[in-house]
Image (cartoon, helix red, strand yellow):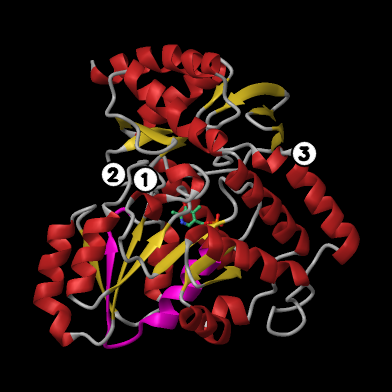
């Protein structure tokens, strides 16, 4: 079809002109933070595998054993025959670790948010979303038919204003935020958001994709705020947990509702058994080793201190450089020195805030961090000049 071909080519040309065209590059991560790309070995600061569990011998062995015992795929939706025995064990472990009544596992974090949000909220309801929330929260929001309002980033007073003005006209109200923001690395003020939500009978959903395993002894961002009522705690098994899958920790009733009604749970094949087995092994390691869980943040703090940046709140540090070209050039310069640090550009982040996004891992050594500091220092000076 010529029209299809023309459409794709025109769109690509437009993206190219705006510096927004993207592509994939084969990357072998078999060595954890040492990756191979284009025949070169690079030290990566771009993986979300914060604890190196994707390559941990115990985690790999658990996955291999599960493949031998149960095969490679779930074979059907979990509601049909895809609920292999490891799933229940994984869900019990997640609920216990997060301190909730129950948990439900989805195929991925993206599938979790696009399933959870429209199960709880619909036409006539109100959904308030932090301006910098992850793309899959926005994707879930679009599926609701509810009125969607953007909340100024990390601003509980603003949330209070929105809810004071609009709560009475809405049916149910959901407030959705990242616990740790994926592109900035800052932590949401979950205690104050929870307090505002409680006063207005609004349900708080926190996405802990980047908190589990690395904050509060590995318990995640909600555990930084003991006592805060966060009834919907979702997250992913694909970052610090090292494998794949998404989850929601919540009350028994909410979890049961998801199993009956969340479309991405009902109509999508269950997680492969090996992914569940890997996550179980990884969660055991997280629970056993708080020192391991603390390392990524401690590296991030060493980095921000050395460069006089605001203290890191999570293992993610954004070095905002401004224009897409500047960020791409910085990433290229680092790569020439053997360091893999991706540039993140609009539309993933707001215009004018293209950046280097640095993710620290427990597998990095202090010397690795020092090397990155010296490589980034001149780039910061250049961008400021
Ligand atoms: C990565 C991420 C997700 C998506 O999780 P996947 O398991 O990779 O689909 C959701 N929310 C946030 C904040 C993320 O960073």
User: Residue 380 at x, y = what percent?
Assistant: 32, 19
Quadrant in the picture for residue 141: bottom left
**How would you rate the neighbour count of disc 3 (Cα within 10 Å): few for under 14, some for 14-19, many for 20 or more?**
few
**What span is in magenta?**
110-132
Q: Which mark is residue 346?
A: 1
Q: Quadrant of the N terminus?
A: bottom right
**How would you rate the neighbour count of disc 2 (Cα within 10 Å): few for under 14, some for 14-19, many for 20 or more?**
few
Within the magenta stretch, is there residue 316? Answer: no
Of helix, strand and loop, which one carries label 3?
Answer: helix
User: Residue 105 at x, y = what percent?
Assistant: 60, 68
Q: Is residue 380 above or below residue 134?
A: above
- Which residue is label 3 attached to? 57
Q: Is residue 120 above or below residue 215?
A: below
Of helix, strand and loop, which one carries label 1?
Answer: loop
Q: Is residue 131 among the parts visible in the rendering?
A: no
Quadrant in the picture for residue 51: top right
Q: Nearer the viewer, residue 146 or 351?
A: 146
Q: Are marks 2 and 1 in contact (CB under 8 Å)?
A: yes
Which residue is rendered at x = 35% and y = 16% of the image?
306
Q: Which mark is residue 102?
A: none
Q: Is residue 172 above or below residue 234?
A: below
Q: CA distance from mark 2 to mark 1?
A: 6 Å
Q: Nearer the viewer, residue 335 or 92?
A: 92
């Amino acid at each position: 079809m010529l029209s299809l071909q023309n459409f794709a080519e025109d769109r690509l040309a437009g993206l190219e002109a705006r510096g927004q065209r993207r592509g994939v590059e084969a990357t072998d991560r078999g060595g954890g933070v040492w990756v191979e790309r284009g025949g070169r070995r690079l030290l990566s600061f771009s993986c979300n595998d914060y604890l190196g569990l994707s390559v941990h011998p115990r985690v790999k062995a658990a996955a291999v054993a599960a493949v031998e015992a149960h095969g490679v795929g779930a074979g059907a939706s979990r509601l049909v025959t895809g609920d292999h025995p490891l799933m229940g064990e994984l869900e019990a472990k997640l609920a216990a670790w997060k301190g909730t009544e129950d948990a439900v596992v989805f195929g991925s974090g993206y599938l979790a948010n696009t399933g959870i949000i429209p199960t709880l909220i619909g036409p006539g309801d109100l959904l308030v979303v932090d301006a910098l929330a992850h793309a899959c929260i926005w994707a879930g929001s679009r599926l609701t038919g509810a009125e969607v309002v953007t909340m100024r980033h990390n601003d509980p007073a603003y949330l209070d204003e929105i809810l004071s003005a609009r709560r009475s006209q809405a049916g149910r109200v959901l407030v959705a935020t990242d616990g740790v923001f994926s592109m900035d690395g800052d932590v949401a003020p979950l205690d104050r958001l929870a307090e505002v939500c409680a006063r207005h009978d609004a349900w708080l959903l926190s996405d802990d994709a980047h908190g589990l395993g690395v904050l509060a002894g590995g318990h995640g961002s909600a555990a930084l705020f003991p006592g805060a009522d966060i009834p919907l705690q979702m997250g992913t098994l694909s970052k610090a947990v090292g494998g794949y899958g998404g989850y929601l920790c919540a009350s028994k009733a909410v979890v049961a509702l998801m199993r009956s009604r969340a479309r991405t749970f009902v109509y999508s094949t269950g997680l492969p058994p090996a992914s569940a087995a890997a996550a179980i092994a990884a969660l055991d390691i997280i629970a056993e080793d708080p020192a391991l869980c603390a390392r990524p943040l401690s590296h991030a703090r060493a980095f921000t201190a050395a460069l006089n940046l605001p203290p890191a709140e999570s293992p993610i540090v954004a070095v905002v450089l401004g224009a897409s070209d500047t960020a791409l050039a910085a990433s290229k310069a680092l790569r020439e020195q053997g360091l893999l640090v991706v540039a993140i550009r609009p539309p993933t982040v707001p215009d004018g805030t293209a950046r280097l996004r640095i993710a620290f891992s427990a597998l990095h050594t202090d010397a690795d961090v020092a090397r990155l500091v010296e490589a980034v220092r001149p780039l910061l000076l250049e961008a400021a000049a």
